Image: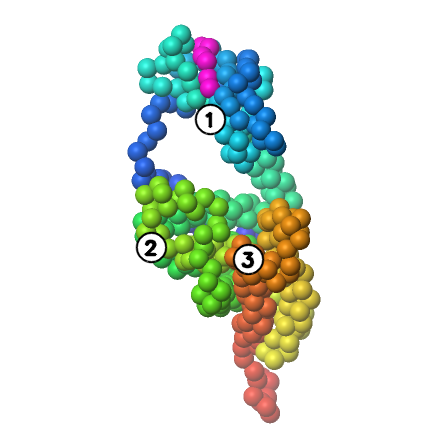
Amino acid sequence: MIHRPAARDWIFTAAILVCCGGLYLLPPVSALPPQEGATALAYVDSVDNADIRQHGLVRAGSQCLEVEIARGRFKGRRFRAGNELRGQPELDKEFQVGDLAVVTIPPDASPKDSVLVARDHYRTGWSLVLFGGFCLLLVLFGGWVGAKALFSFVFSCLAIWKLVIPLVLRGWSADWVIFGTVAILTAVIVYLVAGLSRKGVAAFVGSSAGVLAGLALAHLFGSLMKINGATMPYVQVLLYSGHETLSLPDIFIGAMILAGSGAVMDLAMDIAAGVEEVARHNPKLPARELAASGIRIGRSVVGTMTTTLLLAYSGGYITLLMVFAAQGTSVWDFLNNQLVAAEVVKTLVGSFSLVLVAPLTALASAVLFAPQTRQPTGAKKK
């Protein structure tokens, strides 16, 4: 039997698409003066590495390029371009003949006199190909539900880029801004996937309660363990770009909640869907039995979900773990390091949220799916 979307499902989906358009049209953050010159794509025709020197494990120096503009006003024109290697592998880029580079063209560019700046490799094209393949596979596999999941994906990206980041940069409290955004995203994602149903309400209530509990725990243990948020990447660049008043601990806590919210949503939806199936097959089950079923479902899922968080966070800092292992650092010194302590807080607070969301969602599902009316004892059927 083919499931046909209800009218309210179409209306809600259309409303989300309108919100996506509205978010996209919001003006971008422009705290710094715009960079002089135009950005263009250019093919690398020749490379001169004569000024590059090997210093141990890193390379530093100037790379001289001959490039041909691929599109735009200067299409087909050839320029010289420079690329500086500073001995920082995480930031440096080294070009080869045939690469497609992003270059900056000065306002008064002249092929004879101007030297362009080779900023980076062009990666957007392959990113769009990968995203297009993801969209196609999601829609082919999930059908209408997959299409709604794609809409929620786009809405989440726009909400983070157009709401969270601008509001935090303007001085709003990062943890509460992110919590509010996560609540909105949870509602959108859950109701798009599950529809405007009791299952969606149960998943939303359970996941929101779990995220709120995680926010409280993050504040408590972030303060007790003196986590200042400076362990996040590009913190110094952010502070010295005109945002020195930002609260790094609040941003750290908000990022922690945002990172764990997806797993919390997944678990809440699993439990709500399981309780719905149990109630569908036995509509006479009381709330107590439904809650017990939801808790049993949660027990089966929580173990793997908490391990998922551990693997996700440790995978992002695997090189840090290797450094401590190579230096022979003791376990106590290892755990006491601020970088490691920050990851410990992330993992355990996220795991706390998962463990709490299971019984909370089970209780909410039991209340919503329990029989609403009962026939009085001794009542006669007409």
SS for tag 1? strand
Q: Nearer the viewer, residue 254 or 316?
A: 316
Residue lying furthest bottom? 378
Q: Earlier in the sequence, mark 3 or mark 1?
A: 1
Disc 3/disc 1 C-alpha distance (Å): 35 Å
Q: Which of these two is toward me, 215 or 137?
A: 215
Q: Which residue is mark 1?
A: 119
- Residue 184, given in percent of the width and then of the height, sits at 44, 57
Residue highlighted by disc 2: 172
In three-dimensional space, the C-alpha distance between marks 3 and 2, rounded to whole angstroms, equals 30 Å
Q: How many marks?
A: 3
Quarter of the image holding residue 37?
A: top left
Q: Going from the N terminus, do you reach mark 2 or mark 1 first?
A: 1
Of circles 3 and 1, the one toward us is 3
Q: Is residue 50 left or right of residue 250?
A: right
Q: Residue at x 39, y 47 (%)?
A: 165
Q: Position of residue 270 (x, y in %)?
A: 62, 62
Q: Earlier in the sequence, mark 3 or mark 2?
A: 2
Q: Quadrant of the C terminus?
A: bottom right
The residue singled out by tag 3 in the image is 337
Asked if the residue under mark 1 is in contact with the one under mark 3, i.e. CB atoms within 8 Å, the reply is no
Which kind of residue does numbered mark 2 sit on? Trp
Region rendered in magenta: 77-82
Q: CA distance from mark 2 to mark 1?
A: 32 Å
Q: Magenta includes 376?
A: no
Q: Amino acid at mark 1?
A: Arg
Q: Amino acid at mark 3?
A: Asn
Residue drawn at 30 percent across, 33 percent down: 33
